[in-house]
Image: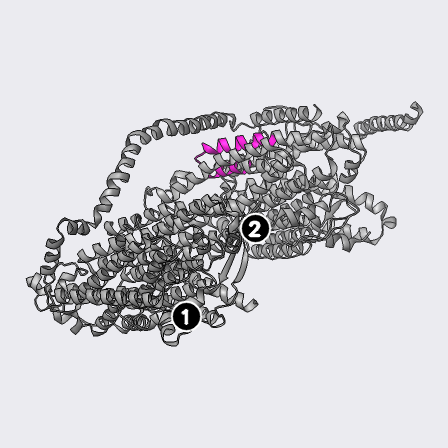
Amino acid sequence: MESATALLSLIIALPLAGFLINGIIGLFVESFRTKKQLIGIIANTAVFIPFVIAVYFFMNMNAGSEAVVFKLFTWIEAGSFSVDIAYRIDQLSIMMTLVVTGVGFLIHLYSMGYMADDEGYWKFFAYLNLFIFAMLNLVLGNNLLLLFLGWEGVGVCSYLLIGFWYTDMAKSDAAKKAFIYNRVGDFAFLIAMFMVFQTVGSLNFDAILGNLEAFSEEYIVAIGLLMFVGATGKSAQIPLFVWLPDAMAGPTPVSALIHAATMVTSGIYLISRMSPMYVLSPEVMLVVAVIGALTAIVAATIAITQNDIKSVLAYSTVSQLGYMFLALGAGGFTAAMFHVVTHAFFKACLFLGSGSVIHTMHHVEHELEHEGKDVHFDPQDMRNMGGLRKYMPSTYKTFLISTIAIAGIPPLAGFFSKDEVLAMAANAGAGEFGSYMYMALWGVGIITAFLTAFYMFRLTLTTFHGEFKLGKRFKEAIGAEKYLHESPATMTIPLWTLAGAATVGGFLGVPNFIVETFTHEEAHVNLLHNWLHHVTADVELTLSHAVEWGLMATSIVIAVLGVVVAFRMYNNNQQQESDAAIAKRFGGLYDLWKDKYNLDEVYEGLIVRPIVRVSDKVLAVFDMKVVDGFVNATAGTVKLFGSLFRYVQTGVVSSYALAFVIGVIVILYLMVM
Amino acid sequence: MLENYFPILVLAIVAIVLAIVLMTLSRILGPFRPNATKLNPYESGMDPVGEARDRYSISFYLVAMEFIVFDLEVVFIYPWAVRYLDLGFGTFIAMMIFIIMLFVGLLYTLKKGTLDWELNNYRG
Amino acid sequence: MDYLGDIQAFLPGVITALAGLIVIVIESLKKDSSATFWVTVLSLVAALFFSIQSLGTGLDTAFSGMLVHGGAVAFGNVIIVVATLFCVFISEDYLKGINHYYGETYALILFATTGMMCLAGSNDLITLFIGLETMSICLYVMAGLIKDEKSGAEAALKYFLLGAFSTGFLLYGMALIYGATGTTNISAIGAAASTDLLFLAGAALLLVGFLFKVSAVPFHMWTPDVYQGTPTTLTAYFATASKAATFVALIMVLSRALPVMEGLNWQMVFSVIAILTMVFGNIIALVQDNLKRMLAYSSIAHAGYALVGLAAGTPEGYSAVLFYMFAYTIMNIGAFGVIAYYERNKGMDFSEVQNLAGLGFKKPVMGIALSIFLFSLAGIPPLVGFAGKYYVFAAAINAEMVTLAVIGVLASAASVYYYLRVMVYLYFREEHKPVELFNPTLLYKGTIIILAILTLYYGIEPILPASGLMELLNSYGNLGAVTNVLIP
């Protein structure tokens, strides 16, 4: 136990130490900043060792292990309110820890290559380590407040990293946007936390989940909804998802780590953690599922219309997160976590692949400039790419693998997880638990699956197949192909590792019914389900095998259909024509998608502008005249007294003595009185 | 009651008589050649009557201060010396410490040159 | 008599006194030798070692009942020696820098420290007076250390005149108390305390003497002038060590000689004086532009907070005051230290707060350290100043003096203004003209950094008066009881 506590402290402390070392030395010692190798090694070690320790913990656990709580010290103690810095290792948190540190390490490694030419190298790695630290607090914390600390911490890191190139106004605006949208959600989360504390007098998970009968029905609904609002902020769901696509302004490894693999899944983690409470309220579950499904399809439709590769991936992320919430709402907490894991693999791989592409496109721009050709193009715009597979074989292959995985083609990871999500939705629709609403949601999910396969292949085909289109768009850039090159090994190794994980990751959750059909007896091949069923309050999957086979077949057919359509429309350089064709077919609807459902404008018009107007016309006046007036009057009075008292201080000793004597008289009087 | 004060009365009478006798004797026996300096109340040359804002040589203060310090030393040492046999060896050490302290003071003031009236070798 | 035992009981004081003599000898043989500094440091380290060692021993008497040691006195000695040590560290460089490196300064500091320890550990009005005067006379001289500057001479003279004035009251008070009780022994006075007019008047005058030393309003008038005229690092010494010593002595006197009883209104006196001190100190500090004067008024205000703890009259209050003194010592020396550093940069007058404009980024370590100290002085968590204030005000509330605590909190809220004002100039204003700051010596920088770390550390992990110090104080309610107590 002792050594285990020490090991656990290491998991938490090493990323923090990495942040402090790189951050503090980098801040004060300028010569340190150029020692990039050293900085990179420090930062990578600070994540790799926790990963190894997490693996060790994982090896020493089994599905039946009780949760172990490591209390380091008491953080806050005020009256009956007591919060410990205590970490909880159970099946759920160790899984998240493995994803965070494992994928996190690969992305750190990748960043060494990707950020190699950046001046803020030391700062970047310091922030990344800080992020890992905060994220570990989030997933390992044994109480809601520590979780919230991590929750806010990852928010801050996300803010810092989105605005990493803060000299670009648009990027720092994106950072602010992300932060503010998150704050809206955090506010709801905070209120939920207050309500929890009010009811059970503690914020520890054991105390909360062991005392569920103490909550009144209204409270269960209210807390569930408020926490879900918090989750919609952090995990980018309707109505708060608009920050995530803008967040792609940050360096690509950040998009991969924070805005695809880890931070954005913390909302799912939160709800899974609180799942015993959620299942008590079918209404809340339905809300979660509806929002999830809507987000999935809304984001998928937007993704079809985007030309920026990171933007497509961003909307794809929002859409996949929607899937996860759909699963949560359908009672498939394990399914959601399953999708979190597989999504972390293939989406991180996709982002890193896109980073690799952007890296090389930047290089092209740079070299052209070197030649004296003044060509400015967007290195993220896929219309400038095409045919990259010849030049970047590793990037292409890994990107393709991940695309197949996300599209849901068996037997890659995405197929199994997405299938389980959809199965859970259908199960909720058919079973006694849910309502028929869930059947509709299943339909939405299936359409989204089609769209996913379609836009992902649109992206892959446009970028990597066909021919290099830069020369067609810019005359000066003809022949720029020679500057295209594959990225260095520090970037391709993580790509291959993640692609490998995306290939086999699905076998963590092979559906039981596949085996059961052949053996005719109960099977437990769904490893993840076995692993988590102590911790999460999953709804039983009661569909018959035939139905399950049917569902599976449907999703395969749909996915293949999406791939085929995409191939026919985009394989041969006909991206523009095909986009136009789609636009023509869907007319106004397509414009709506392209304008991202005008959500930014709606928020601007309905919320931002009225608030600005009110604060400008009414509150500002009130603030300036009344509040400031009051404050200034107080301060003025005090200052006036100060200046008056100052005159007592004449500098003449005899007047000092006079004051002294008066004091003596006062004291004598008080004493004798 | 009053007879308790009789010795004091005797002492006072003796003192007065002694003063008168001594002054008379010196007047009769000694030569008397007055000049302006000799007729000053203080033979040091200080004029007791005059402007209050007169400036004195700093050396007066230094010497006066040092005088007080060593004067007080005597005040301490006499009673101790008288009772030494009763008080024992411990007080001897204590007194030595006291004298060493004063000696350090003397050394300091000597090395600083404050005992030189003209303050020629004074090192602030 | 057990001389060795007595000397051992007062060992820190003996060491500093001896070291003072050695310094004087060295100084008289070789002018301004750097050996004086090292002798001072060594002796203080030794004194600190022995003071810390005696922490946790029970209160006991020595020198035929003239002095007490152990218990709260041991903690007081630790504060005094720590303050002295840090002040010596920053003084060396500073005094050299302003070309007034006098070897005697260290002798004066050491003698004053001896006096402080005698004052803090006095068990008799006589030793109390001797300690107080030993300390004060050394301070008078130090105030006028820079002889050729008018402000220095003014400071020394004013301090001396008013000090003598207050000493008169103090002695008169002692005489009256002796007249009323027939003893000068402090615990015997407590046993013979009455509501006799003679005793009341004596107690009042005795308190006046103390209140002058801690610069409580309206006996504070000397403070700004003296702090301004004294070399800054020595000002730090005045503001911390002497104040701590006086407060410890005050605690010892109050808790033993003046029992809480009907008709003996000393708690009332402290409440009124505490309110006056907090309010006046803070309000006048608001309008000060001179940094040292601002800090002088701030130190007056801080004395006010400490008086709140005394007014509570409970062991909790006393222990809170002890901790407050510790906190105040650390952060105030730090603040004075950084300001002394700025001040030394030739060709610039950094005494006005406006002249600090834009300096925060120039030497980031100094800037950050000053920010920490000022935040701590303002009482912003998680720094030690906050912990100190919290305990003091909590003690007042537990003693049912809510009004006092509320006024204290309000006053300390107002104080945030003038502390933050310095930071605004440091970080948010453009500098007037380009300034090159020199590099502080390693010792100087190290001292400041250590102080900043202590400010943070004890803010997060305060020595809980609730546990350790409380026990320590309970042990001196009666002198016979020797309770085993705290290690910080």
In this view, the residue in front, C88 or A53, is: A53
Left-right relation of A351 to C43: left
Query: How far across and down, in percent of the image, does residue A168 sit?
Result: 24, 52
Res A271 → quadrant: bottom left
User: Residue C174: where, in percent of width, then height?
Assistant: 73, 33
Identify the element where label 2 is drawn: helix
Q: Which residues are magenta?
A: C273-300
Magenta segment, prevailing SS (helix, strand or loop): helix
Quadrant that contains the N terminus of chain A = bottom right
The image quarter in which residue A667 lies: top right
Image side of residue A343 versus residue C455, left or right: left
**Callout 1 environment at 10 Å: few (<14), some (14 to 19), or many (20+)?**
some
Q: Does the rendering let one see residue B44?
A: no
Residue to which mark 2 is pinned: C103
Task: Identify the residue position indicated by label 1 in the image.
Answer: A527
For badge 2, the amino acid type reads: Gly
The quadrant holding residue A126 is: bottom left
Query: Hey, which residue is sitting farthest bottom in the picture?
Result: A519
Nearer to me, A54 or A207:
A207
Q: Chain of mark 2?
A: C
The answer to whether residue A152 is magenta is no
Q: Judge if badges 2 and 1 mark residues of a common chain.
A: no
Does dot 1 land on a helix, a strand or a loop?
Answer: helix
Q: What amino acid is labelled 1 in the image?
A: Leu
